[in-house]
Image: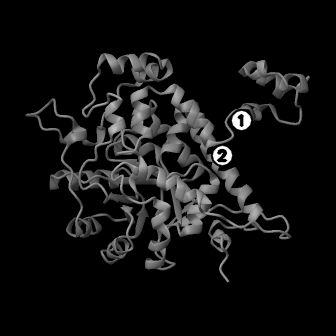
Amino acid sequence: MKEVFTGCSSFRHPSAKRLIALANPARPAHLAGAMTVDLDYPTLADLRRRARRRMPYFAWEYLDSGTGEDMALRRSREALDNVVLAPAIAKGRTVPDLSTRFLGHDYARPFGVSPVGMTGLFWPRAEFLLADNATRVGLPFGLSTVAAQSPEDLAPHIADNGWFQLYPPADVEHCDDLVQRAQDAGFHTLILTVDVPGPSRRERQRRSGLTTPPRITPRLFSHAMIRPMWSLGMLRHGIPSVRALEKYVSSHRPSAHVGLAPHSAPDPALIEKLRRQWKGPMVAKGVLLPEDALALRELGVDAAWVSNHGGRQFDGGPGSATALPAIRAAVGPDYPLIYDGAVASGLDVLRAIALGADMVMLGRAWLWGVAALGAEGAAHVTHVLSEDIISCMVQMGITRPAEVRSRLWPLQA
């Protein structure tokens, strides 16, 4: 019976999959759902395709786009594709250990959840879904200043896994207060965004009809109506706003959009001030030049985050993976480096580590997961990445992620 069902495309309906699971007594009943999800969505690219079908066009364009012609975004992907790793033979059966100690904290995997602006726009309550999964598994979870939820909202969900990304408000008192709020909410690592001295144009986002501040136009309304699951969720939980900054909206300008609050362009004085104020590890996100990484280290920053902001700020810049090796060479082997940019598989995580990263963060991929499958999507992204990393490590005969650096092709003598 199992062979009849699996050979017929008409039995891809969920109820048919349950029958297939029941026809396979070797798999416990409580794993049947996970089995069918893994069969239908074995890669993050599969989740991406489903997410695109479930999100309104304007939300998808906001998530998926870079700026200009998306050249910087593509360069990140091409740079990862060009990283080749060497397999090994006659090593016996290796047992990979993915646990990672980073900036004084223990994590179950060498990857985590990157902060993304307006996360809750892409799927209702996305911040909570991602934080809960990160806490359950043991991953770093990043919350952006301009996410749809505030640090206080996420406090019960982050356990010891919370990182807070700061877009520093221009008003000094507001900036100090926001930093203190994040610490009080239990976030232990501060991410200072250093690569947004001013806004980028993000033309695809503009063409979609999405404005800042958002306005519900007939065009956007029509996009939402053909995505009923997204729309029902938004009706149930409310249209997302930048809750972390609502406190600072002037009473004299009640219509002001909090996401447009002026932000500082970080300079050494601000970095030194934040270093004195923040009690835990401090990371600078958006580094592409070796000399910048060295300067940040001298200012007391605990780790540099190599990133081109998902290609969303400067279309003329390099891919993150292109910049990473030179930064690692400049700062030496012991200075912590984080990587993001176009990661779409466990193999990509290992590629970034091979180039010099100690921790790899993903942004868009987590949103593909929750938009595709809701709460189950975050767990499935974790599963796909973990299984792929383990499979690749077994092929290379290594037991720890950092050992992949010895497998970078061409092999060093």
Where is residue 297 shown, x and y percent of the image? 36, 75
Question: 288 or 172, which is in the foreground?
Answer: 288
- The residue depicted at 46 percent of the width and 73 percent of the height is 326
Please tell me whether residue 88 is drawn above or below residue 376 in the rendered image: below
Question: What is the spatial separation of the Cα atoms under label 1 and label 2, in whole angstroms?
Answer: 10 Å
Where is residue 47 shown, x and y percent of the image? 59, 36
Residue annotated with mark 2: 383
Question: 160 or 172, which is in the foreground?
Answer: 172
Q: Amino acid at mark 1?
A: Ala
- The residue depicted at 33 percent of the width and 31 percent of the height is 207
Question: 277 or 386, which is in the foreground?
Answer: 386
The C terminus: image quadrant: bottom right
On the question of residue 310 being in view, the answer is: no
- The residue depicted at 88 percent of the width and 36 percent of the height is 26
User: Element type at marker 2?
Assistant: helix
Where is residue 332 shown, x and y percent of the image? 48, 80
Residue annotated with mark 1: 34
User: Element type at marker 1?
Assistant: helix
Among numbered discs 1 and 2, the one appearing first in the sequence: 1
Q: Quadrant of residue 95?
A: bottom right
